[in-house]
Image: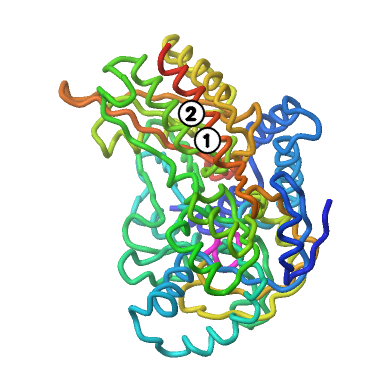
Amino acid sequence: MRKLNIPLSDEDIRSLKVGDPVMLSGKMLTGRDAVHKWLIDTFIEKKRQPQGDDLDVYAAIKPILDGGVIYHCGPVVSGLDTGDYKFVAAGPTTSIREEPYQGRVMEHFNIHGVIGKGGMGATTLAACRQVPGVYFHAIGGAATLIAKSVEQVLGVHKLEFGVPEAIWVLQVKDFPVVVTMDSHGSSIHAEIEDRSKQVLDTLLAK
Amino acid sequence: MQDLTNQFVELVRLAATSLPPDVEKALASSLENEEPGSAARGALETIMTNVQMARDNVTPICQDTGTPIFYVHYPEGWSTLKLKAQIRAAVAQATQHNYLRPNAVDPVTGANTGDNLGDEHYPTIHFEEVEGDTLTVELMLKGGGCENVGAQYKLPDNRLGAGRDLEGVRKVVLDAVYQAQGKGCAPGILGVAVGGDRGTSFVASKETLLRQLDDTNPDPQLAALEQSLTSEANQLGIGPMGFGGKTTVVATKIKTAHRLPASYFVSVSYMCWAYRRRKMTVAAGQVSYS
């Protein structure tokens, strides 16, 4: 079991291979559908003008994402009325919805790790090769267990996106993941899909 | 009429935090089938640990507490208006207690209502009047990841060589499992509806998921198809979380619905491993849960 600290160096990333179990510690951000679309529209394609606190949030998250990790997660959070936030349940959400955005977001911010579930496609795999980065798979549905590795909620941005869609800033300790897409072009998801397609074709021909 | 708001909060708590015994048992036996040291077995071990932790800590098994779907069977004399108001109040309270994540989002503006109360379909409540004097309320929490990989087919399907018969049904269901890969949080449970119109077909594909996982379909033809679909889906080798492995599908449940001569729909509702469903029974003023 590898233990790695965030930010992750290029050497850390290049040393990881699909199948490697890893424990991550350090500061990371959550970001899913609304966040990825907001980043692309406002700062990458620039098809909408920054509004409200957009520029402040951008300045706040940029250093955390540099060599850092983004987690596809919409948590259950307690303390919403007091601001004393705690993660109650915090498993990964399905990552493939971010496929149209993820590669460009990784390149823009130099993101070295993406955590989610279900895997991602060819565009993200290419970005993993280039940036470099890896896709870390967390166990979908294991929300109470994963919440235990969130030591502290350091803050939140864009809460107006809703609790699941906001950018939560986390301090994590020994966050359990498995590398399923690496920076050398390997993807467990692509492999399993190819293999299961061959079986499907045989079953359909019966 | 009894005010059951608090009892409905308890139903939600139980559903969100304590996996039903039949589902837990099926996952435990899947774990035993996977190779020691494999990623598939590791995933199932994490899943089993999480199930126990969620129950002990009274926290959600999965952070996506899903669409709350209620099935209410009420005897004559109960007011569905009042039951609906009590269920809605209970859902809002359960959200405050963090048994549910705020999940109701305006489809156009993206604004989250914050309390899981949306328009007339959110939470979803199905009412059916029944004989006798027992009220039962079943609750299913269905997450977005698995809902997104659900599929509806129209037979014949030339791409898959699927005709208008049970053999065609078999082919499209296997395609749905292949398309889902690990994205619906495999190992999954398949709710399959054969027939109906597009709407009733999807509704039936969820209703059939209310069956116990180890029961047998009373129709021998459908029972055989359920068995063979589970077994063939597992040959695909997608495995827990899509890591590869022996368990891709835990069980298949099929329901039929009369159709028009012209239409032959097959709907697949994919349920994730975290199959959260619980039942509340009210008989002679006494409330019990299962």
Task: Check disc 1 and give the amino acid type.
Answer: Glu
Whether the magenta-drawn stretch holds residue B56 is answered as: no
How has the structure been colored for display?
rainbow
Q: Which residue is mark 1?
A: A193
The residue lying at 48 percent from left, 40 percent from top is: B136
Q: Quadrant of residue A173?
A: bottom right
Q: Chain of mark 1?
A: A
Using a 10 Å C-alpha cutoff, classify the residue at mark 1 as few (fewer than 14 neighbours), some (14 to 19) or many (20 or more). many
Viewer-proximal residue among B287 and B199: B199
Q: Chain of mark 2?
A: A
Using a 10 Å C-alpha cutoff, classify the residue at mark 2 as few (fewer than 14 neighbours), some (14 to 19) or many (20 or more). some
Q: Is residue B81 above or below residue A101?
A: above
Dot 2 lies on which element?
A: helix
Q: Which residues are magenta?
A: B94-101
Q: Which residue is mark 2?
A: A197
Labels 1 and 2 touching (C-beta < 8 A): yes
* Res A21 visible: yes
The residue lying at 44 percent from left, 36 percent from top is: B179
Residue A18, position as x, y percentages in the image: 69, 46
Task: Check disc 2 and give the amino acid type.
Answer: Lys
Give a yes or no on whether discs 1 and 2 share a subunit.
yes
